[in-house]
């Protein structure tokens, strides 16, 4: 591929630990847990009664009533984060070539809340009870579509859907749209709004989520021996990508650089990780090769680390196979210990955290780590943030269906 460099010049976030990108970062560095008892619905009949929710979210703080009614929360969250990212770029939208801006932003599930509510309306009132906005509010590509429409961006506009790898896949594809020369700028990332009756019911029926109802804030505990499942999260994170010379010409602030990625498949099981980690190893190795770096160059890995018994072990073992002894010199972490698992937005949130680690030379902690698991023995940056020079950092994100992604971020240098 071309030698065009791709840098990050704008960031936005709406998350359980902060409703802006700076607040998100401060929440991570301070070890804030976003888990709390569910506010969105009555949980009396549910075995899990908590999630990582956006605190005090009121859609009317961001949209007028008519607009809010026509946007599922998954689109609302993305539009809010995208607006922050666009403001952060410092771009004058009247001065740029909008044909050269792609919008590649995904969601793992789409308008789940809309689907649930409209299904009830159909059951109660028949076909005439279904909103004419049902389909546009439901489909996953509408997240990217709404952002494109709002700003008039006419470059490639679509989404990849790969469950919990979605956010990272979309960032990688946005990177490609610039690297290949199709565009000079790209809006990228992910959004998810799964904290609903049907969403929580689905995951609890799989027995995938923690049931630590007596202490939700300590429930997400990646790599801890007493972990018992993930905590469902929600929100959005957006990275605005830009070709380096384009960014340099306007003297843009640059947070970091993307230098490569690796995508792969487990080809193993619809939900369980491959215990041998072959797909994960392939994704990491492809990412290192694309970035043209050695395993010993890596300083930090923001791991997928969902707090599930099998997943954390499988990822740990894969990293040890790739990095050998150097694995123990890397500062690993799982920011899901604070944000919960935001599914299609997770890879985007964690990519943003990884970029900011290179920008600030700081590794957010893995909180709630109390009891070591002999099978998880890496340096997980436990309970307190660590200051460290971070030149190269990886973000791993994996999804149901066996989808694997690894993105390589680099500290920006002229």
Image: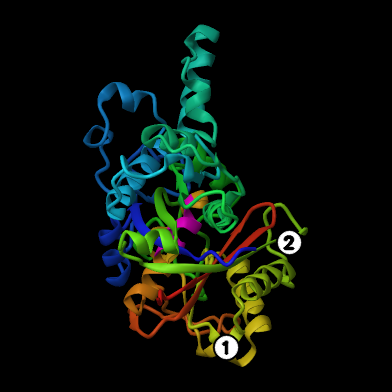
Whether residue 89 sits left or right of residue 284 in the image: it is: left
Element at badge 2?
loop
Which residue, given by chain and number where applicable, does mark 2 sit on? 266
Q: Earlier in the sequence, mark 1 or mark 2?
A: 2
Give yes or no for residue 47 being in the magenta stretch: no
Q: Residue at x 58, y 84 (%)?
A: 374
Which residue, given by chain and number where applicable, does mark 1 sit on? 296
How far apart are the two marked residues, 1 and 2, measured between alpha carbons? 25 Å
Q: Residue furthest bottom?
A: 325
Q: Viewer-proximal residue, 324 or 31?
A: 324
Magenta highlight range: 345-352
Crowding around mark 2 (Cα neighbors within 10 Å: few <14, some 14 to 19, many 20+) is many
Residue 335 vertical placement versus 390 (above, below): above
The coloring applied to the image is rainbow
Q: Nearer the viewer, mark 1 or mark 2?
A: 1
Q: Residue at x 50, y 58 (%)?
A: 347
Element at badge 1?
helix
Whether residue 386 sits left or right of residue 230 in the image: it is: left
Q: Residue at x 42, y 66 (%)?
A: 337
Residue 116 vertical placement versus 77 (above, below): above
Q: Residue furthest left?
A: 61
Q: Would you identify the image quadrant in which residue 212 lies?
A: bottom left
Image location (x, y in percent) of residue 64: 25, 26
Image location (x, y in percent) of residue 278: 74, 70
Can I make out residue 113 in this image? yes
């Amino acid at each position: 591929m071309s030698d065009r460099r791709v840098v990050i010049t704008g960031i936005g976030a709406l998350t359980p630990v902060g409703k802006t990108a700076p607040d998100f970062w401060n929440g991570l560095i301070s070890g804030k847990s976003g888990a709390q008892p569910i506010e969105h619905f009555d949980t009396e009949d549910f075995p899990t009664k908590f999630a990582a929710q956006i605190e005090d979210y009121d859609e009317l703080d961001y949209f007028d009533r008519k607009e809010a009614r026509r946007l599922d929360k998954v689109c609302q969250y993305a539009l809010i984060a995208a607006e922050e990212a666009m403001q952060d770029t410092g771009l004058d939208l009247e001065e740029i070539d909008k044909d050269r801006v792609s919008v590649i932003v995904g969601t793992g599930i789409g308008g789940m809340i809309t689907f649930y509510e409209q299904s009830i309306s159909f059951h109660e009132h028949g076909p005439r009870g279904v909103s004419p906005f049902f389909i546009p509010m439901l489909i996953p590509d509408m997240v990217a579509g709404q952002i494109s429409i709002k700003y008039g961006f006419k470059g490639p506009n679509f989404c990849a859907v790969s469950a919990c790898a979605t956010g990272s896949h979309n960032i990688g594809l946005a990177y490609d749209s610039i690297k290949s020369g199709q565009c000079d700028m790209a809006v990228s990332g992910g959004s998810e709004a799964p904290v609903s009756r049907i969403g929580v019911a689905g995951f609890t029926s799989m027995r995938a989520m923690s049931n630590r109802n007596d202490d939700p804030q300590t429930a997400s505990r990646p790599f801890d021996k007493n972990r018992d499942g993930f905590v469902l999260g929600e929100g959005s994170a957006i990275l605005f990508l830009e070709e380096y010379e384009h960014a340099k010409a306007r003297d843009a602030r640059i947070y970091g650089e993307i230098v490569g990625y690796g995508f792969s498949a487990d080809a193993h099981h619809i939900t369980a990780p491959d215990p041998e980690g072959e797909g994960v190893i392939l994704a990491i190795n492809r990412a290192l090769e694309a970035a043209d770096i050695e395993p010993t160059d890596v300083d930090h890995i923001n791991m997928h680390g969902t707090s599930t018994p099998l997943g954390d072990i499988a990822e740990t073992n894969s990293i040890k196979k790739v990095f050998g002894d150097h694995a123990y010199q890397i500062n690993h972490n799982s920011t899901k210990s604070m944000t919960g698992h935001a599914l299609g937005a997770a890879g985007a949130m964690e990519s943003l955290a990884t970029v900011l680690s290179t920008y600030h030379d700081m590794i957010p902690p893995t909180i709630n780590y109390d009891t070591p698991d002999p099978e998880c023995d890496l340096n997980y940056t436990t309970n307190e943030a660590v200051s460290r020079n971070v030149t190269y950092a990886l973000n791993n994100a994996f999804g149901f269906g066996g989808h694997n992604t690894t993105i390589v971020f680099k500290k920006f240098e002229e």
